[in-house]
Amino acid sequence: MGDDRPITRGYVLHPDIRTDPDRHAPEPALEEAVSLAVALPDLEVVGSEIVPLNKVHPGMLFGSGKIEELKARIKAANAGLVLIDGPVSPVQQRNLEKALDAKLLDRTGLILEIFSDRARTREGVLQVEMAALSYQRTRLVRAWTHLERQRGGLGFVGGPGETQIEADRRAIDDQLNRLRKQLAKVVKTRSLHRAARAKVPFPIVALVGYTNAGKSTLFNRLTGAQVMAKDMLFATLDPTMRKVELETGDEVILSDTVGFISDLPTQLVAAFRATLEEVLEADVIVHVRDISHPETENQRAQVMAILSDLGVTGDTPMIEVWNKIDLMPPEEAAALQARAARDPDLFVTSAVTGQGLSPMLQRVSERLSAPKTTEELFLPYTEGRKRAWLHEEAVVDDERPGDAGYQLTVTWTDRQKARFEKL
């Protein structure tokens, strides 16, 4: 993003709230928060710690004694920004910034910064701006954010009078309306591109997985493409698509998607639905897991929950890939291999060494060539959308117009039939 942005020194805090029913193991949670922070190019992490809390203090998040301790350590580290791995209310943010004498960003704000930094397509940029504006609307305090600079700034200032807040809100609402209109145009154009691609009926294979599971490294290995594959969270945001010829001779479109993450605020999941749209269209989903990560089971659950939220159903064939096997001790690696051998849709791989990729791709080919059946259909002339869909999917063998509609002969997979019935 250029070297003209000043480097900000950041201090990461993970509040470990003992009474929180959704509490995560604090050490891996802090490690993930630091990885998130490191993903910003203009941020240097100079310190991090877990802050044990029995309860949340409504106005300040932490108790006054704890704040004094933290302030001393943040000052000693010469940090100008405090990153809190969790939600912080606007009131808490204002009070903490004053008490700690530093700018503050909560988890949502940090993820927005990363999204802003990674968005490449016009649509990705618009989605980020909308999510950022909605987030800012609840705050109206000056945030540490280059989103504001990109937008030319809407003049958020700390504690303005009522009229200033109202003016800022109105400015944000106007901006949101403009962005929605632009987005509608972009989405319309993209659906035209997609319809054009449907005429070249290459199946889509979507790589999904928790962030940093090794999807981009795998994508690069399979396509030879240089997608940004640094060891950082959110290294990919907009889905990158490449045509790949499998060893079986099948041609597919491989799609690399943004990494999923725990506790992604719902408004951000909604904002990034577009980035994950290819997953809904996929013929096969390849779920890449970092099997060496201590939280790998929890990460799997998060990914499955987000896929379910997006509307991915059990109709879509899914292959699970246990990646980074090269980081596992030999005995554990052998045990994982033995488990995977019992499941035809489970593979142990290393995207770095190439281990296990051939059999995995062979299985992708098998799952793509799902058995097909030929059936007769009748469609009334009023069902134009269904007819167009059948032609887009290239399943129509024969079509005869009659008095009341079309008589069609179609050859399709069970999955295509199920999708047709949902239209």
Image (cartoon, helix red, strand yellow):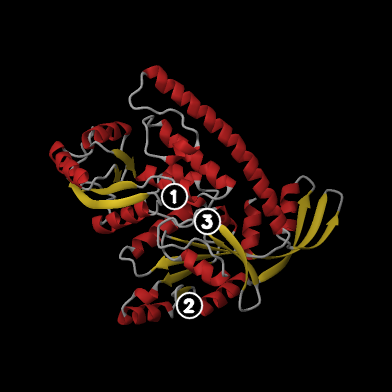
Residue 85 visible in image? no
Q: Residue at x 35, y 64 (%)?
A: 297
Q: With 382 as the anchor, is 38 left or right in this view? A: left
Where is mark 2, residue-wise? 354
Residue 57 visible in image? yes
Comes first in the chain, label 2 or label 3 = 3
In percent of width and height, residue 33 lies at 32, 53
Extreme-left residue of the structure: 65
Q: Residue at x 64, y 54 (%)?
A: 421
In percent of width and height, residue 24 lies at 28, 54
- Distance, label 2 to label 3, CA atoms, is 29 Å
Mark 1: amino acid: Asp
Mark 3: amino acid: Val
Comes first in the chain, label 3 or label 1 = 1
Where is mark 1, residue-wise? 3
Tell us which disc is closer to us: 3 or 1.
1
Comes first in the chain, label 2 or label 1 = 1
